[in-house]
Image (cartoon, rainbow, N blue to C red):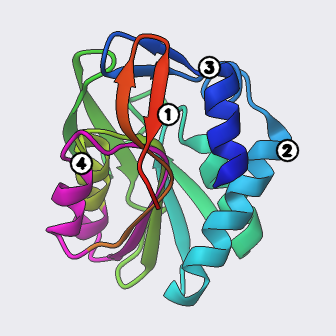
Amino acid sequence: MKALENKILEEGIVLGNDILKVDSFLNHQIDVELIDKIGEEFANYFKDKNVDKILTVESSGIAPALATAQRLGVNCVFARKKQSLTTDENIYHSSVYSFTKQVMNELIVSKKFINEGENILMIDDFLANGQAAKGMIAIIRQAGANPVGCGIVIEKSFSNGRQIIEDMDIPVYSLARIAKLEPGKIVFEEN
């Protein structure tokens, strides 16, 4: 998606050789016009998957997931990373490691929000090592639902996340695929 790649080049900040900071438009401040285009792109790509619901992980996945859900006319569910006082014991859960924060997170979704037989589309902001996606897939399968695809805003193609998801027979569609990060330099995968 050219508009996204341009925004990454204009405002993305490379930290080391593996972290891309995009908080000016994606995961702290949200560029609403860009998010709308992202939702439209995902909705067009996955429109034939008979999506019943979208699942993401709080918090950075919520904006692109919501934009996609709105375009597809379905609800959006986000996996919480912490239980709150209002969370009951009737939950699906999965443990995942966050590369960026370097902590284990427990993903939690109430059983009343994902139902057996539903077609679930996963949307997330980044794909690197595939841990968040694996956690969402585990939750979807615990519910007896069907993971029908994984939409990623920015993929770090130099990591193994795509292969992990595709090995589970789940299609991955990434809007921007980064081949290499170097201080001051972002290299995209060739189409």
Q: In the picture, residue 80 is in which quadrant?
A: top left
Q: Give yes or no for contact between labels 3 and 1 (Cβ–Cβ under 8 Å).
A: no
Does dot 3 land on a helix, a strand or a loop? loop
- Identify residue for label 2: 33
Could you tell me how far apart the alpha carbons at marks 3 and 4 are, in whole angstroms?
A: 22 Å
Q: Identify which amino acid the numbered label 3 is placed on.
A: Asp
Q: Is residue 33 left or right of residue 151?
A: right
Query: Which residue is nearer to you in this view: 102 or 78?
Result: 102
Could you tell me how far apart the alpha carbons at marks 4 and 2 are, in whole angstroms?
A: 28 Å
- Identify residue for label 1: 86
Please tell me whether residue 162 belongs to the stretch shown in magenta.
Answer: yes
Mark sitting on residue 23: 3
Could you tell me how far apart the alpha carbons at marks 4 and 1 are, in whole angstroms?
A: 33 Å
| Range of magenta residues | 140-169
Q: Residue at x 26, y 55 (%)?
A: 162
Q: Residue at x 72, y 22 (%)?
A: 29
Q: Give yes or no for contact between labels 3 and 2 (Cβ–Cβ under 8 Å).
A: no
Q: Disc 1 vs disc 2: which is toward the camera?
A: 2
Q: Residue at x 61, y 83 (%)?
A: 47
Q: Where's residue 103, x and y in %?
A: 23, 17
Does dot 2 land on a helix, a strand or a loop? helix
Q: Which of marks 4 and 3 precedes in the sequence?
A: 3
Q: Where's residue 55, x and y in %?
A: 48, 57
Q: Which of marks 2 and 3 precedes in the sequence?
A: 3
Q: Give yes or no for contact between labels 1 and 2 (Cβ–Cβ under 8 Å).
A: no
Q: Identify which amino acid the numbered label 2 is placed on.
A: Glu
Q: Which of marks 1 and 4 precedes in the sequence?
A: 1
